Amino acid sequence: MNCPVCGAPDSRVLDSRPVEENNSIRRRRECPACGKRFTTYEVVDTVPMTVVKKDGSHEIFDRFKLESGILKACEKRPVDGHAIAAAVEAELVNRMSAEISTREIGEMVMEELRRTDAVAYVRFASVYREFKDVGTFLDEIRSVISQEEAAASREEKKE
């Protein structure tokens, strides 16, 4: 690291500590040539994730859009929509992929909601899958009910 005062090519790290929820590191440095102290911040350089939409167009991932859709599905439900959005976003980031389709994002959200709250799941699925009529809505509800019954049956067998 070059000294900002004299331009010397080396500096000595005196202190390092994480800042901003461990997303960056603050380093206190000293120049051995002129003795001046200065601070640097190291931040992970990330490539923005691109979302491939149904029509083939691309746009930058927007956490607000993801969270907004989840919060609408979880409205007036005992579910923390922010936590679900954070979990889905963390999974997306962990994939380390530059592109992801809206289909993959939607499936991740539905899986997280299915595990968390059946009503929020059906609400989200009705918009995401573009239910055309009440019959489609009922089919999805029946599917959720049968999954819950199967899970309850497995729990009874464990006991």
Image: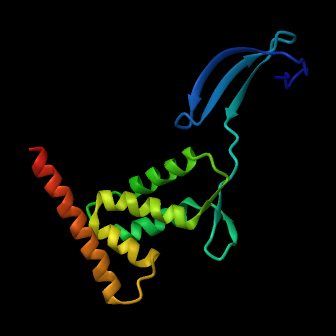
Q: Is residue 88 above or below residue 102?
A: above
Above/below status of 58 relative to 88 = below
Quadrant of the snapshot with the N terminus: top right
Residue for point 63% across, 17% down: 15
- The residue at the point 64 percent across, 27 percent down is 26
Residue 140: x and y, percent? Answer: 31, 76
Give the left or right position of residue 26, taking residue 141 as reference: right
Residue 16 lies, with reference to residue 117, above or below; the image says above
Check the image and name the residue furthest to the right: 7
Q: Quadrant of residue 146?
A: bottom left
For residue 91, side relative to residue 139 (left or right) = right
Q: Position of residue 69 (x, y in %)?
A: 46, 69
Q: In the image, residue 20 lies at what x, y percent?
A: 56, 37
| Residue 76 visible to the viewer | no
Judging depth in this view, the residue of 100 and 23 nearest the camera is 100
Residue at screen point 81% across, 14% down: 31
Mark yes or no: residue 10 visible.
yes
Q: Nearer the viewer, residue 71 or 128?
A: 128
Relative to 138, say whether 57 is above or below.
above
Left or right of residue 158: residue 82: right
